[in-house]
Image: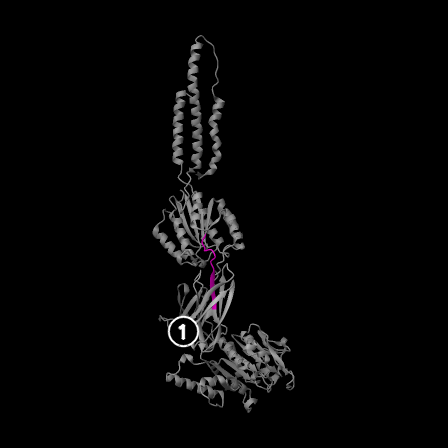
Amino acid sequence: MTYASAAYLSALPVIAIPLIIYLIFRRRRRDIPWGAIYILRKVIETRSRAVVWLQYCIIALRTLACAALVLLFAAPNLPREPAVSMPDSAPSTHRAIILDTSESMRARFAGGTVLDAALAQARAILESTQDPGRADLLGGDGKSLFASFDSLPVDEHRLEIAVAECSERRDGFDLVAALRHAETLFSASPFTRRELYLLSDFRARDLAPEVLAEAAPRLLRLRERGVTFHALALRETGAANFALYECSPLEPLLLANQPVLFRARIGYFGEGPTGQTVLTVKDSRGSLLHEEAVTAGPGMNEVIFPLSLPAGEHRLAAALRPDTLEGDNALERQFSVLPGLNLMVVQDITDLKGFDNPRTWLELALRDLAGKGAGQKVKFDNVQEAYAAASQSAISKIEQGAVDPSAIPFSISVEGKIPEQINPDLLSETHLVIALDLDQPGPESLDALRGYVMRGGTVLLAPGASVKEEHFNTSFGPISPAPIATPTFKSVEPRRYEQCMVEAGDAAFLLELEDPRHGNLGAARFYRWFNVDPKALASEARVLLALSDGSPLLLERALGRGRVLLWTSGLGGDWNSMVVHPAFPVWLIRTLQRAAARQRLPRTLQPGEPVLLVTDAPSARVIGPGGIDEVVESVETGSRRFIRYDKTTLPGQYDLRIDLASEMPGELFDVVSPHPEADLRPATEIVEKDFADAAGGPIHRDAAALAAAVGRDTPGTPLARWLGALLLLALVIEAGLSRILNV
């Protein structure tokens, strides 16, 4: 038997009051002798036995009436049968449900998802809440109130609307805020019983030590208000999850049909030491580009694989085979693949011919590439003729249908200019500018180069044997990473040389070239170079390559959106063997790639980073996640116009359409999702025990255990009417007997 107000049972000692009164005030017998005493004594002795028993009955009835009165206030209830489903609520019960709708609740569970099971349980709790009472369905974020039912039983139509809204929500889970919300509701509740239900997957991040430290006082206050707390953990034993965090090239810019390494970052969160999944990469047409079985260990894993793509815009979709949580298994990224790169060599007019001219070494480094594009054995006087022949041959074959345009390799155009020809318009389509043996360009040329760098371009300063260091420092001082000093040695001696090594560990392409399998950059010999004082480096400058004696060889300086490189040993064959080394052409191409990438705005952004699009249009329509659909005006900066959109806090795809009325996708940008809920590791037993101690009850593992616990705490059929009838009957009988005895 259970009692709705068990505190009143402390008044049960009042049942002794009738007996105490009887013992104090009972009539004592007095003997008075007189003549007919004998006959009267016989009559009294016969009747007194009946009177005594009637008095005992009156005392018992009065005691029973007092007991019935106390029990009536304590409100006893008959015990319930063991519950196999959610029992109906007791009269005057206020039930509140905290429902976790975070991303991790989309994990697979019992043929559906964890959220499906939680919604089914919430429905059972709401439907079993009976009148008089109230039921509330709260969000786990501490802000949402999906439904509140004041009239019971619950309205099915309103319940369906609330369930549909919950199934669409992906709010985060904040235990402290959710308890604060529930505490506010119960503080104004007029009902006798208060029950709080928490339906969640109880992951380790949800019950972190700092969270429990804040939640424990609130759980204690709820218990002091008479709130009964029930928690249900919905999760599959041994569940593991893979999450795909990134799939992008190691190089910031791709070249047509040039193999490039891609990196996929995969997180594995499970109880086992390893897990297996399959990574697939497809293009926008659904063609499979790469498929690989991956064995991953706990935490973050990297998978490196090569891809080769034709020129143009590409949208690649990477995915993992389905596992416990599918929402973090796929991502799409937009990439631009360039058909060619433009290299501009700025050099004073010179009569140097052949190998005496440093430009010859540049042309030789790139000549094989052009020859392959031409597809024929022809001797050309210079690299420009070779590229022209390659382009003409490719165009002819395309027109004849003999070559697939998507199979044309990338090309590099090398254009030579003198300093007086340099201007902003000429540099607008240039990916890398090499100032070759240049020390006194004009002020107009310097201004054009500086503006080019500020807008994202890259300039490589390559002073050689003909450069005067004082002239170089005067001219290029405002943009150079550092001033140069007199060369280390007055002349070249073959037996006296140094070798280079990578100084900046984050320059991945240099580390790759340093590997003996990929060029062995350190094997090149350097016989002479300009001295650079490391203490004289400009702000935002650093050393990328250094010689074995510590002298800087390649320096980099950030300037605006672009950068300036300084090569201290010349790009000719006078001072080093680098120009005949296998790594030299690869280093040139990679430097070109990095330079070109800095002039292109990123398509993959972090939440909060602005979307930027260079366009001449006055405005653009922005369509994004969460119902974003608005028109943004372009702004002018220098000689360019930009569309800038800053409201990118929501991860997802942002579509910028220059044609405001078009229904076709425009320029696509991806704001990545950090997948904060990919880690499905459950809370430990110790943490769950600490939570249960603070909540005053265990965390149940299935719906049957929850129903049984609620059934034990919920009173059965109330006995108030029977106690009232018993009290009335006892009082009526007692009154009748008292009248007979005249007491």
**Residue 197 visible somewhere in the drawing:** yes
* Residue 14 included in the magenta stretch of the image: no
Instruction: Write down the quadrant of residue 194 in the picture.
Output: top left
Q: Which residues are magenta?
A: 233-246
Residue that lies at the very extreme toward the top in this rendered image: 35
- Name the amino acid type tagged 1: Pro
Query: In screen coordinates, is 361 left or right of 724?
Result: right
Query: In screen coordinates, is 157 left or right of 390?
Result: left
Instruction: Write down the quadrant of residue 67 in the picture.
Output: top left
Task: Name the spot of residue 600 as percent of width and height, x first.
Answer: 47, 75
Task: Name the spot of residue 431 as percent of width and height, x first.
Answer: 49, 80
Query: In screen coordinates, is 357 left or right of 627?
Result: right
Which residue is more in the foreground, 535 or 510? 510
In the displayed structure, would residue 544 be above or below residue 278?
Answer: below
* Residue 240 included in the magenta stretch of the image: yes
In the displayed structure, would residue 351 be above or below residue 107?
Answer: below
Instruction: Write down the quadrant of residue 563 in the picture.
Output: bottom right
Number of other residues with Cα within 10 Å of mark 1, as a class: few under 14, some 14 to 19, many 20 or more? some
Q: Name the residue: 49% across, 67% down.
A: 265
Q: Quadrant of the N terminus?
A: top left
Task: Name the spot of residue 260 as percent of width and height, x first.
Answer: 48, 75
**Residue 607 visible somewhere in the drawing:** no
- What is the basis of the colouring in this image? one colour
Which residue is more in the foreground, 158 or 89? 89
Task: Name the spot of residue 547 as percent of width and height, x first.
Answer: 62, 78
Instruction: Look at mark 1 in the image and give the residue it sits on.
Output: 618
Q: Quadrant of the C terminus?
A: top left
